[in-house]
Amino acid sequence: EPEVTQTPSHQVTQMGQEVILRCVPISNHLYFYWYRQILGQKVEFLVSFYNNEISEKSEIFDDQFSVERPDGSNFTLKIRSTKLEDSAMYFCASSVAGRSQPQHFGDGTRLSIL
Amino acid sequence: KNEVEQSPQNLTAQEGEFITINCSYSVGISALHWLQQHPGGGIVSLFMLSSGKKKHGRLIATINIQEKHSSLHITASHPRDSAVYICAVRLRAAGNKLTFGGGTRVLVKP
């Protein structure tokens, strides 16, 4: 069964450094999402992406965050200048269509900021 | 303000027992998802519901739109069912994003 794949599985970065989290959505999917889960807390929505542009973003997704679909297969989340509070599990998800279809999740990238 | 509430937060069952997890939400939704989060952190989509009932193997999910309530049932529970089960909703007024409940941690003892 097709899967959403995320790399790396664990990323350790110094505070202030830039980090790029990578996702390969399922190939025929058109809608892409990033969520994050701080340890012990609920999963939170960050951003959704469709037709090469952001369709919705949360208040968490401020100017230090950006997303890109650079080559038609990868979907990346960049955090420009990481803070300690960015430490979390980051999940990528994709769906064939928007409202009527389930979202399929990757296994997540655990980001640790030192 | 918690738009999605799950109960219980934690549940321990003996192998073979019937398990029920509840999810209540406070606003209009277009769909409700039940997700399973493994101990390693990965998330698997179990069901997406907008009405009625769905069954997959030993898992059954129901939703009552009028009462804004959904349940996930696990029949003949097994230790491999031990995981965190998460309810997430797609709010009618909020595009495609999911809003998550806090999860129910299930432990099934052999």
Image (cartoon, coloured by chain):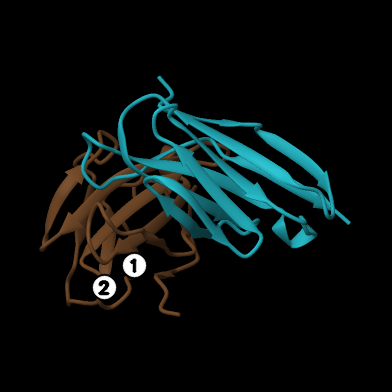
Chain colours: A brown, B cyan
**B90, above or below A69, in the image:** above
Q: Read off the chain for label 2.
A: A
Query: How far across and down, in percent of the image, does residue A72 sit?
Result: 18, 76
Q: Which residue is tagged 1?
A: A22
Q: Could you tell me the amino acid type at mark 2?
A: Asn
For marks 1 and 2 on the same chain, the one whose residue lies earlier in the sequence:
1
- Judge whether residue A25 can be spotted in this image: yes
Query: How far across and down, in percent of the image, does residue A99 sit?
Result: 25, 52
Q: Residue at x 25, y 36 (%)?
A: B92
Query: How far across and down, in percent of the image, does residue A5 sit?
Result: 41, 72
**A21, above or below A44, in the image:** below
Identify which residue, B15 or B43, lies in the foreground: B15
Q: Is residue A9 left or right of residue B57?
A: left
Marks 1/2 in contact by CB < 8 Å: the verdict is yes
Label 1 element class: strand
Label disc, if present, on residue A74 of the rendered structure:
2
Identify which residue, A94 or A67, lies in the foreground: A94
The number of numbered discs placed on residues in the rendered structure image is 2
- The Cα atoms of the two marked residues, 1 and 2, are separated by 7 Å
